């Protein structure tokens, strides 16, 4: 481009006879170069904007997790006092005291609140983990059997395991919860009609140049991972819905509420993993959960 400008500047004086065709050729070359530069800028702009939006979404989810974790921790401290004092009061009361029933209601309500607090801590990634060696294939196989018998829907759940698959260090109960939430969300996306949820496992190696720019809660650390893949044939998500899908209590269905996919993100976060989502309206959704393989 700079060379073309230099040539045109050198030719800015009145050209001698016979050089007009060469000048026209230079101008055509300049026009083509300008068009190519403009096209490159247009192609790069959506990629840059998409990366900025992804970074903003990750920052928003991280802020929500920090806020939720802090509030849940403080609220849990308050609940400990409520549970302890209600239990002590029940011990001091006679069995026929009319005050026992209200105190029992207080105790039961505090326990339900404590269960909710544990779920919020799970979303924040600050829940306590009972880590042990886990065979992901076996865990998914067991979960699929129970989900298939309990779902009461026309949709099918299929499992395609990778064999062999290395074991991981994880909390098996938390992974079951994440898997159940993923499948429940996929079934809801497909509605009451027929559809297919395909679960599969795999192993991948992640490097700095891996195409995982949109992973949540962030780009995974380089290393080896097992992958749990959940793909459905549902309605898919628009970009607007996708940008909020992992926020707690976000839903597009009237009458539905809960932590939903945010629980999955929290469990994956606490295991130092990542989530990658691919979706489009009327094209289904694919969710890949990456869980690190111990280096030892």
Image (cartoon, rainbow, N blue to C red):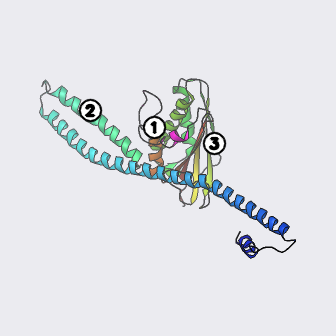
Q: Is residue 209 magenta?
A: no
Locate the N terminus by quadrant: bottom right
Look at the numbered disc 1 and give the secondary structure of its residue: loop
- Which comes sooner in the sequence, label 2 or label 3? 2
Look at the numbered disc 2 and give the secondary structure of its residue: helix
Q: Could you tell whether 110 is left or right of 140 in the image?
A: left
In terms of depth relative to the viewer, which is nearer, 114 or 279? 279
Main secondary structure of the magenta stretch: loop
**Within 10 angstroms of label 2, few (less than 14), some, or many (20 or more) residues?**
some
Q: Which residue is mark 3?
A: 161
- Which comes sooner in the sequence, label 2 or label 1? 2
Q: Position of residue 128 (x, y in %)?
A: 38, 49
Q: Nearer the viewer, mark 2 or mark 1?
A: 1
Q: Which residues are magenta?
A: 235-258
- Which comes sooner in the sequence, label 1 or label 3? 3
Q: Residue at x 23, y 29 (%)?
A: 105
Q: Position of residue 97 (x, y in %)?
A: 12, 25
Any part of residue 55 in sight:
yes
**Within 10 angstroms of label 1, few (less than 14), some, or many (20 or more) residues?**
many
**Quadrant of the rendered structure where residue 109 is?**
top left
Cα separation between marks 1 and 3 = 25 Å
Locate the C terminus by quadrant: bottom right
Q: Nearer the viewer, mark 2 or mark 3?
A: 2
Q: Residue at x 27, y 48 (%)?
A: 74
The dot on residue 109 is 2
Q: Is residue 244 magenta?
A: yes
The dot on residue 260 is 1
Q: Residue at x 55, y 38 (%)?
A: 238
- Is 45 above or below relative to 82? below
In terms of depth relative to the viewer, which is nearer, 284 or 239? 239
Cα separation between marks 2 and 1 = 22 Å
């Amino acid at each position: 481009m700079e060379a073309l400008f230099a040539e045109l500047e050198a030719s800015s004086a009145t050209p001698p006879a016979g050089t007009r065709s060469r000048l026209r050729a230079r101008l055509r070359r300049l026009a083509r170069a300008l068009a190519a530069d403009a096209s490159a800028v247009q192609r790069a702009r959506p990629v840059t904007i998409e990366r900025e939006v992804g970074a903003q979404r990750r920052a928003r989810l991280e802020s929500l997790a920090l806020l939720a974790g802090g509030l849940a921790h403080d609220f849990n401290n308050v609940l400990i006092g409520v549970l302890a004092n209600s239990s002590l009061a029940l011990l001091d009361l006679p069995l026929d005291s009319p005050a026992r029933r209200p105190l029992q209601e207080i105790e039961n309500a505090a326990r339900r609140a404590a269960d909710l607090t544990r779920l919020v801590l799970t979303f924040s990634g600050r829940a306590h983990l009972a880590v042990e060696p886990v065979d992901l294939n076996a865990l998914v196989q067991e979960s699929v059997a129970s989900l298939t018998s309990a779902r009461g829907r026309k949709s099918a759940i299929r499992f395609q395991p990778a064999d062999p698959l290395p074991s991981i260090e994880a909390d098996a109960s938390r992974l079951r919860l994440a898997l159940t939430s993923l499948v429940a969300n996929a079934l809801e996306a497909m509605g009451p009609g027929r559809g297919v949820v395909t679960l599969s496992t795999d192993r991948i190696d992640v490097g700095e140049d891996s195409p995982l720019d949109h992973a949540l809660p962030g780009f995974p650390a380089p290393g080896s991972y097992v992958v749990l893949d959940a793909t459905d044939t549902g309605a898919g998500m628009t970009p607007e819905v996708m940008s909020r899908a992992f926020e707690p209590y976000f839903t597009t269905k009237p009458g539905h509420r809960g932590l939903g996919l945010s629980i999955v993100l929290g469990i994956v976060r606490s295991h130092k993993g990542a989530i990658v989502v691919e979706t489009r309206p009327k094209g289904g959704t694919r969710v890949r959960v990456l869980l690190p393989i111990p280096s030892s």
